[in-house]
Image (cartoon, grey):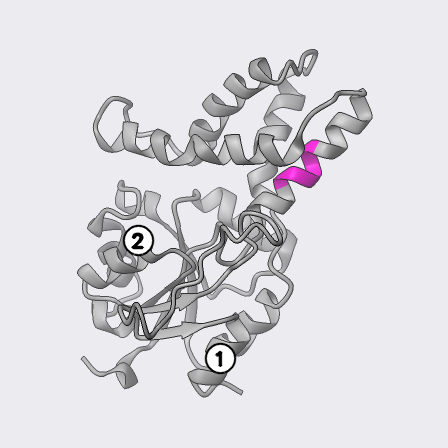
């Protein structure tokens, strides 16, 4: 199916649309300041995120029954509160802390770029975050989704093919009419394997400014993707959006 037939763009969210590391680190640093704790907030953010993939794999392998991302994040948070010697939080405070992931800030150009892309295409999230998380995040950050889609609607986490196929089905489109947009190569390769088109957006600061740990695929050395862009605005320019 030619690229001209693409009608919808679906987006990975954590790292692609929002700055998860900076957002989590800032909130942890604020908590530490309020309580007089000595916490490496960046390390806490990294360690929390490090539990994300293994938690989903435990669901994928059947070790855990189906649980949503909030529950996966909470199991990891309970471990980290012990490891970082954070004591005295009430259950309500811990629940609020766990929902940091509902309050992530977008990358500086994300809302503008998404709005431009929306002028020509249907735009929807396609994240392993829950519908509730993604809705709360969009409401707070002003993300202009036409539709909030989550892998939980398929009962599978990305990169399982069912998550991409279900998104196309829910949009009433063929897989080739949908373009997955992400800052993570493995996500895009899995989407392509399910018949979706792909757009790679570099987020060099995903793991902190100047760390060099972000995603910077080169379209010449890695021509796997239909588009490679430096931002959503760059992608909008390439796709002929106003």
Horizontal side of residue 47 vs 23, given as left or right:
left
Residue at 59%, 32% in the rendered image: 43
Where does the magenta region start and end?
24-28
Residue 79 spot, x, y in % from top left = 51, 17
- The structure residue drawn at horizontal position 31% and vertical position 68%, both measured from the top left corner, is 198
Choose between 55 and 185: the one closer to the eye.
185
In the image, is residue 51 part of the stretch drawn in magenta?
Answer: no
Circle 2 sits in a helix, a strand or a loop, which is it?
A: helix
Task: Please tell me how crowded label 1 is: few (under 14), some (14-19), or many (20+) other residues with Cα within 10 Å.
Answer: many
Q: Locate the N terminus by quadrant.
A: bottom left
Residue that badge 1 annotates: 236
Identify the residue shown where x is 51% and y is 30%. Answer: 47
Say whether residue 177 is left or right of residue 105: left
How far apart, in angstroms, are the residues tagged by discs 2 and 1? Answer: 22 Å
On residue 186, the disc is: 2
Label 2 neighbour load within 10 Å: few <14, some 14-19, many 20+: few
Q: Quadrant of the C terminus?
A: bottom right
Compared to residue 85, the image places residue 171 above or below, namely below
- What predominant SS class does the magenta segment belong to? helix
Q: Which SS class for mark 1? A: helix
Q: Sequence order check: which comes first, mark 2 or mark 1?
A: 2
The answer to whether residue 145 is left or right of residue 159 is: right
Which quarter of the picture shows residue 109?
bottom right
- Pointer 2 with pointer 1, Cβ within 8 A: no
Whole-percent x, y for residue 50 in the image: 45, 33
Indicate which label's residue lies in the foreground, 2 or 1. Answer: 2
User: Is 26 one of the magenta-colored residues?
Assistant: yes
Residue 45 sits in quarter: top right
Percent position (x, y) of residue 211? 57, 50
Front residue (pair 138, 195): 195
Q: Residue at x 49, y 75 (%)?
A: 118
């Amino acid at each position: 199916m030619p690229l001209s037939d693409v009608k919808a763009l679906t987006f990975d969210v954590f790292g692609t649309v929002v700055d998860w590391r900076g957002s989590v680190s800032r909130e942890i640093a604020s908590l530490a300041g309020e309580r007089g704790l000595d916490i490496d907030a960046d390390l806490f953010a990294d360690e929390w995120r490090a539990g994300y993939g293994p938690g989903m794999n435990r669901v994928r392998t059947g070790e855990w029954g189906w649980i949503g991302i909030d529950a996966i994040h909470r199991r990891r948070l309970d471990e980290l509160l012990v490891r970082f010697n954070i004591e005295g939080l009430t259950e309500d405070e811990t629940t609020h802390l766990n929902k940091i992931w509902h309050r992530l800030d977008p990358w500086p150009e994300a809302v503008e770029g998404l709005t431009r892309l929306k002028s020509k295409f249907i735009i929807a999230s396609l994240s392993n975050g829950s519908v509730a998380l993604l809705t709360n995040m969009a409401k707070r950050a002003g993300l202009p989704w036409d539709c909030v889609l989550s892998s939980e609607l398929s009962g599978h986490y990305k990169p399982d093919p069912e998550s991409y196929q279900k998104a196309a089905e829910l949009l009433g489109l063929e897989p080739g009419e949908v373009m997955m947009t992400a800052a993570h190569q493995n996500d895009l390769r899995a989407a392509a394997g399910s018949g979706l088109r792909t757009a790679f957006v570099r987020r060099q600061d995903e793991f902190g400014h100047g760390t060099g740990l972000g995603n910077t695929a080169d379209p010449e050395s890695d021509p796997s993707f239909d588009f490679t862009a430096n931002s959503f605005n760059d992608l909008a320019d390439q796709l002929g959006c106003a």
